[in-house]
Amino acid sequence: MQVCPPKYALNFLRWFCREDYLEEIEGDLVEVFEMQYETSPKKAKWKFTKGVIRYFRPEFIKSFKSSYHPTLFAMFRHNFLLAFRNFKRYKTSFLINILGLSSGIACVLLIYLWVADELSVDKFHENEQQLFQILEHRKQAGNLILFKSTSGITASSLLEDMPEVVSAVGLRRMGNSTLSIGDKNIRARGQYTGKDYFTIFSFNMLQGEASQVLVDKNSIVISESLAINLFGSTENVVGKLVEWEHEKQFQVSGVFRDVPKNSSLQFDFVLSYELFLENSRWANHWNSTGPKTFILLEEGTDIAQFNEKIANYVQQKTNNKITHRTMFATKFSDIYLKGKYENGQQAGGRIEYVRLFSLVAIFILFIACINFMNLSTARASRRMKEVGIKKAVGAHRFSLIMQYLTESTITVLISFFIALALVLIFLPQFNTLTGKQLALQLDLPLLLTVISIAVLTGLLAGSYPALYLSKFRPSAILKGNLGNSLRELLIRKGLVILQFSLSIILIVSVIVVYEQIAFVQDKNLGYNKDNIIYFRRLSGDENNLKAFLAEAKNVPGIVSISSTNHDMTGHNSGTYGVQWEGRDPNDKTEFENVVVNYDAIELLDIAIKEGRTFSEKYSGDTAKIIFNESAIKYMGMTDPIGKVIKLWGDDREIIGVVKDFHFESLREDIKPLFFRFAPQSTWNIIAKIEAGKEKEMIQQLELLVEKFYPGFPFEYQFLDQAYKAQYLAEQRVSTLSKYFAGVAIIISCLGLFGLAAFTAERRIKEIGVRKVLGASAISIVGLLSNDFTKMVLFAITIALPLSYFIAQQWLESFAYQIDLEWWYFALAGILSLLIAWFTVGLQTLKAATINPVKCLKNE
């Protein structure tokens, strides 16, 4: 049997080895290989390869000749030299292009980093394709409203009844809790979840078996950071005891790596879901909701068919007693970006901002490329003789196109490296604006993206000038029969109009977003959120609460203090357990359930429309109820004071009606709401404080908390800040829009500045003649600015209707929104016109004041 040496090594030898040595070297190596192959084939192959590498030395390497045409390299070298000479000759155009392109590419890279991070959220789970979350549409007041909460037993029930479900877990967030080791107390975010949680989700375990860490309901699983804070290390932590809320001890069964930043589920420790169900009997019934449900479906499951099966699942489980809830599953990794639904249909979400900024990136880069194209074609006449001579001596159009594409590519590459430097400089500030921790890591996806951006930008910026300059006939060029063609002027003007149209749309967008955010933050909400501090109640003892509130009233700076179960910044707790005379038995509209203590309504300055609030002057307020106007209207009541309704089967007398107030964001309509008096069920302590005494009051309050709740860290929030946090995404969009719109305007002005300079330069003799004939500097400025003014006015005419449509679409996501005032659009138009006049005016004024002798000295 004939044996052959390794092909890759033999081919490599034949490729590099000189002809006069090849036969001898190859023969020796093959002979040795065949001898050794009989004893050890593996060793023979290795030694043959090693021998080839040993001969890879200068004395044995042949000289390589380019496989390209000998003139090709010379052509590229020639093009590079011409490019650098032209850069040196036309410094202004070169600098404008570099500034515009580098700014544009830097914005594109920053936006790419942000978009890539947004698209990566929840995508890191190994089971991402089969991991789904159960959501519900609930029919309320004739509308379908999306809820992410489910009944507490949904997970176990689906796992038992649906063969497509491989695993399922319920999840209930508990917010911040106190974990203690001796005298050390740490506040951490916790949640209850099922035993399969760490096998469904890819939160990597450092210690403990993922499938076993939550089997025991007395176990706790903690994060890497929490383990270090509690124990000083992650080593030998399993088996140690941790005290939760100074009430119960749990044994550490596992340690997981800190949750990635691109996870929508953020937590520091996990307790058993069985413990939650044991302590929360309401969660064991289908008529109550609160926890979330996650399921792992079999690979290949048809999600549409599965959703048909579970649509009426709650109805089936309750023998048609609950008919207003429709269950469906959606991919968990899609919810972060596409979690918005309207009347049962998916209607966007954060994906809208991803698309918006992606479009802004394209706009900015396109505006920068327009500058390049305009300045290149505008200066075409300067290079006509060069083109004519080259064509006359036999240059092909392809070689000319390559020459101009080489120039554009070099410009883009220089701009690209400047853009990378700009990104590195501004990335910390960008992270502050976006609330992210982005980093410029040149991994393969980013490198491919960057290379693609550079190549596309080079081709886009250089394609039109290259095709335009290379098309002229040498006879016409050398005879001087070329002028500014109508087509050239129209294209150049059209690009300027497009450039400013995009800039004006961005300006209008900035104004509208700013005004809407100001509107939602300054709108009268129906309650007073200013100078109100709130913090979590740290003990369930009602007597302790009374004593704490009584002593806190004496703290200097506290105007009023009370407690509630609500944070006034969103849906907290709802029920459809309100029954009144004439209610449709099939109506399951949810009422917001707000539990309060004495003085809570007065503290928040919620206006009473009729009746009274809860007061210590009256007895039996636990059997009373207060509704908002929307609830009374929905129930169809007139003269509601004194009427009796049923809440969860118990009689409740209506003692008051408050005016409507916004307890959710302004994206939502005001929903029916009621207040009930139950101090033992409140967990947020709220205090109204004197303005200007915040620091002293907080110090006093911290001492009081330590006295009544020793060992519990004091964490507080201001209500107005918590309210503003609801619009954090919009605030960031507003801020980023300002910066990106500013960049777009600056790039547009750079292009206009360059074109104005070129126009003035070409008409320099005309200016000289006019000045000799008595024309004033102002009239010359007006003459030179006239064309640019017309272009910007045309851009305004195109951009304003488009910007109105875009703004209207964005505002539709808010239930309460500003009216699109005429002055928003007028301001954007006037601003763009003033910027254009200022930019052009700098150049035209310079040209208008030049000495006419200098203009005409060459004549």
Image (cartoon, rainbow, N blue to C red):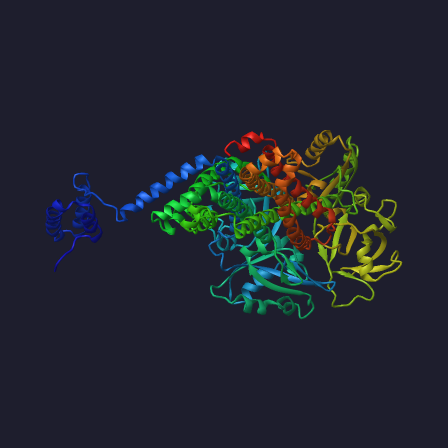
Q: How many marks?
A: 0
Q: Nearer the viewer, residue 607 or 557?
A: 607
Image side of residue 750 versus residue 542, left or right = left
Q: Position of residue 719 (x, y in %)?
A: 72, 41
Image side of residue 665 versus residue 478, left or right = right
The reply to whether residue 682 is visible in this rendering is: no
The reply to whether residue 26 is visible in this rendering is: yes
Q: Quadrant of residue 86?
A: top left
Q: Position of residue 181 (x, y in %)?
A: 56, 37
Image side of residue 379 versus residue 58, left or right = right
Q: Nearer the viewer, residue 789 or 323?
A: 789
- Does residue 276 lie above or below 855 as drawn? below
- Does residue 137 lie above or below 379 as drawn? below
Q: Position of residue 859 (x, y in %)?
A: 51, 34
In the rendered image, the quadrant that contains the N terminus is: bottom left
- Does residue 426 lie above or below 679 as drawn? above
Q: Nearer the viewer, residue 242 or 607?
A: 607
Q: Position of residue 233 (x, y in %)?
A: 48, 37
Q: Nearer the viewer, residue 838 or 545?
A: 838
